[in-house]
Amino acid sequence: MPLVALDAVVHIQGVGGQRSVPLTEFYVLPRDRPDIENVLEHGELLTRVRIPLLPAGARSGYLKVRDRASYEFALTSAAAALLIEDGTIAWARLALGGVGTVPWRAREAEEILCGAPAADPTFRAAAQAALRDPFTVSGTAFKVELAQRTIIRILHTVSGAWS
């Protein structure tokens, strides 16, 4: 999931040749085929993952929230990368996992972060934007607030801006 935040691209080899797919487009929503989780075709294989370098001075982190230490799956998770210049966020990447069926980039939240002060009100606004239209089903609505808190915490951690 953190690689989704970092603009990673997967390279795939198959009988038809090679292709590259941004990780944001690799996972597919279940719709009427819950057995299909990604864009790999029969006989294809991931051969490498390309992760672009972060801008010089950027910091990144990942936070996974789980029910108990014995469980490996995340109730929610968030990955963030920030470049902060003179207290202002110059560049931001944010992705979420555990809330929906696929990891996703929180692009609206990234837009709120860029150009804003690295401070709690900015982080809260970004968290709200990231989950403005959440897809929840019975029994998962609690994850919206939990995911927002996860986002705020990882942004504080990565930025070093604790208030």
Image (cartoon, rainbow, N blue to C red):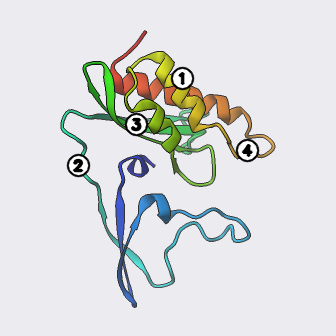
Residue marked by disc 4: 136
The answer to whether residue 132 is left or right of residue 10 is right
Q: Residue furthest left?
A: 56
Q: Amino acid at mark 4?
A: Thr
**SS of the residue under disc 4:** loop
Q: Residues within 10 Å of mark 3 (few under 14, many from 20)?
A: many
Specify the label residue 80 is tagged with: 3
**SS of the residue under disc 3:** strand
- With respect to residue 81, does 104 lie above or below? below
Q: CA distance from mark 1 to mark 2?
A: 27 Å
Q: CA distance from mark 1 to mark 4?
A: 20 Å
Q: Residues within 10 Å of mark 1 (few under 14, many from 20)?
A: some
Badge 1 or badge 2: first in the primary sequence: 2
Badge 3 or badge 1: first in the primary sequence: 3
Specify the label residue 124 is tagged with: 1
Image quarter of residue 68: top right
Can residue 13 be seen here? The reply is yes
Badge 1 or badge 4: first in the primary sequence: 1
